[in-house]
Image (tube, helix red, strand yellow):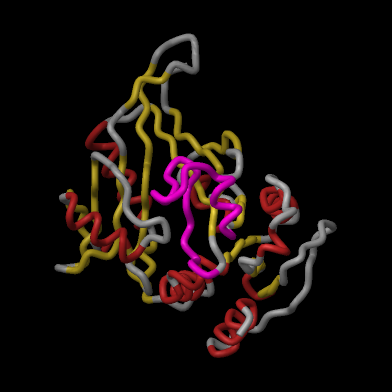
């Protein structure tokens, strides 16, 4: 069964009404599913060598720009991500449709976490899994961990006339199937009270929107990053980074000769919360 058909069946099972139309001037080789009730557009991108081989580096990024201009929330839903993390993707979509267990942050307690608890939670509940972070905080509803936010140590920044220290907000995730209303705000406020950062940065995955939630928390959009290059084999459906190739390959060209496809995502949007004295 084709990838887009799987997504359509899932939406139909959830009684989500959608139209198959492209609202953009830019054409796409891949189908769009528009959910008007939520002003949400799902771009179903199948991992197909013939369709992807001539896609330009900024193609998906430009589509995201056009969606942002039209104030449409656009999700680039990749076949490999769907196949590898079907349940997590489906629950994340349902949360966007308002179909999740809702908890208010005021009902929860902030607790600092150790590495194992953090890794286990993020590996189960975040599409990009866990990564290194120094400060790790969670929201607990009684004894249940329902949300996590992690932060880096401060780093000395050299991009201005005066040196300053900046932290990065690295990961945020709700427990799958759950939405903690005000959860990110509560965790961020706790971190700020504990560590008094004057400069904080974070990144939003543009395959999943534009980071509008960060703006509501006082962050300012700075720039969009260059789209990330991945290599993927249609039979394997596992993403590989150029700086971390499988051991049997020395170069990207070797991988492409073995049937791997070069793909570029929509990149990330950078946001900062800058409270330095001007």
Name the chief secondary structure element in magenta.
loop
Camera-side residue: 247 or 208?
Answer: 247
Q: Give the residues in magenta.
A: 235-259
Camera-side residue: 194 or 163?
Answer: 163
Q: How many marks?
A: 0
Q: In the rendered view, does 151 fall on the left or right side of 200? A: left
Q: In the rendered view, does 138 fall on the left or right side of 14? A: left
Can residue 241 be found in the magenta stretch? Answer: yes
Residue in the image at 64% along x and 69% along y: 44
Residue in the image at 45% along x and 34% along y: 273
For residue 193, above or below residue 112: above
Q: x and y percent of residue 2 in the render? A: 63, 80
Tell me if I can see residue 40 in this picture: no
Can residue 127 be found in the magenta stretch? Answer: no
For residue 165, above or below residue 240: above
Tell me if I can see residue 191 in this picture: yes
Q: In the rendered view, does 19 fall on the left or right side of 140? A: right
Residue in the image at 41% along x and 20% along y: 157
Q: x and y percent of residue 30 in the render? A: 72, 68
Q: For residue 226, which quarter of the picture?
A: top right
* The furthest residue to the right: 25
Residue in the image at 30% along x and 60% along y: 147
Camera-side residue: 70 or 52?
Answer: 52
In the picture, the quarter occupied by the N terminus is bottom right
For residue 203, above or below residue 15: above
Q: x and y percent of residue 267 in the render? A: 58, 46
Q: x and y percent of residue 51 in the render? A: 72, 63
């Amino acid at each position: 069964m084709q990838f887009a058909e799987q997504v359509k069946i899932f939406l139909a099972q959830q009684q989500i009404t959608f139209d198959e139309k492209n609202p953009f001037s830019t054409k796409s080789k891949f189908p769009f599913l528009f959910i008007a009730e939520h002003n949400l557009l799902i771009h179903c991108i199948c991992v197909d060598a013939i369709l992807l081989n001539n896609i330009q580096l900024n193609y998906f990024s430009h589509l995201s720009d056009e969606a942002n201009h039209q104030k449409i929330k656009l999700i680039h839903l990749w076949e490999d991500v769907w196949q590898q993390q079907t349940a997590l993707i489906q629950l994340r979509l349902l949360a966007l449709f308002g179909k999740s267990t809702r908890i208010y942050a005021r009902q929860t307690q902030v607790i600092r976490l150790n590495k194992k608890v953090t890794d286990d939670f993020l590996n189960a509940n975040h599409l990009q899994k866990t990564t290194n972070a120094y400060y790790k905080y969670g929201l607990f509803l009684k004894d249940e961990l329902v949300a996590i936010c992690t932060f880096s140590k401060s780093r000395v920044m050299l991009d201005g006339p005066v040196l300053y220290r900046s932290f990065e907000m690295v990961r945020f995730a709700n427990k799958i199937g759950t939405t903690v209303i005000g959860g990110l705000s509560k965790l961020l406020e706790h971190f700020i009270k504990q560590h008094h950062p004057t400069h904080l940065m974070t990144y939003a995955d543009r395959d999943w929107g534009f980071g509008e939630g960060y703006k509501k928390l006082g962050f300012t959009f700075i720039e969009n990053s260059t789209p990330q290059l991945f290599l993927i084999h249609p039979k394997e459906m596992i993403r590989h980074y150029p700086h971390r190739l499988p051991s049997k390959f020395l170069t990207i060209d070797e991988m492409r000769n073995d049937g791997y496809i070069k793909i570029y995502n929509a990149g990330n949007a950078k946001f900062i919360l800058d409270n330095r004295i001007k």
